[in-house]
Amino acid sequence: MLPGYLAAIIIAVVLFLIAGVLALLGKKDVQDAKPPLPTETLESIKTDVATVKESAGR
């Protein structure tokens, strides 16, 4: 049977390995992510431009 300190060290190493793998996967996902596109703002600007063009045409 393992002494208590040795069992705790083994568990700690396993948990650190799992945390390291998850951190690398998370880092990869963050690097692959694209910045969000402000679709509502783009639509609002298009509407504003159309309104200004329509008003200028009168």
Image (cartoon, rainbow, N blue to C red):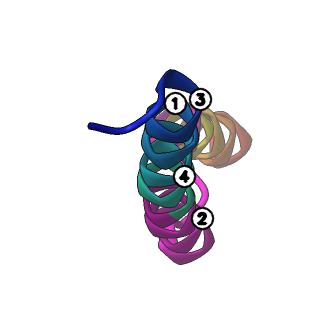
Residue identified by numbered label 1: 8
Residue at 61% x, 57% y is: 35
Amino acid carrying label 3: it is: Tyr
Q: Nearer the viewer, mark 2 or mark 1?
A: 1
Residue at 73% x, 43% y is: 56
Residues under numbered marks 2 and 1 in contact, where contact means CB atoms less than 8 Å apart: no
Amino acid carrying label 1: it is: Ala
Residue at 56% x, 60% y is: 20
Q: CA distance from mark 1 to mark 4?
A: 9 Å
Residue identified by numbered label 4: 13
Residue at 46% x, 65% y is: 21
Q: Which mark is residue 27?
A: 2
Q: Nearer the viewer, residue 38 or 43?
A: 38
Magenta stretch, overall SS: helix
Q: Which mark is residue 5?
A: 3
- The answer to whether 24 appears left or right of 52 in the picture is left
Q: Nearer the viewer, mark 1 or mark 4?
A: 1
Give the x, y percent position of residue 26.
Answer: 50, 57
Give the x, y percent position of residue 11.
Answer: 43, 39
Q: Determine the image quadrant of residue 43.
A: top left
Magenta-highlighted residues:
21-44
First along the sequence among labels 2 and 4: 4
First along the sequence among labels 4 and 3: 3
Give the SS element for disc 3. Answer: helix
Q: Residues within 10 Å of mark 2 (few under 14, many from 20)?
A: few
The answer to whether residue 12 is magenta is no
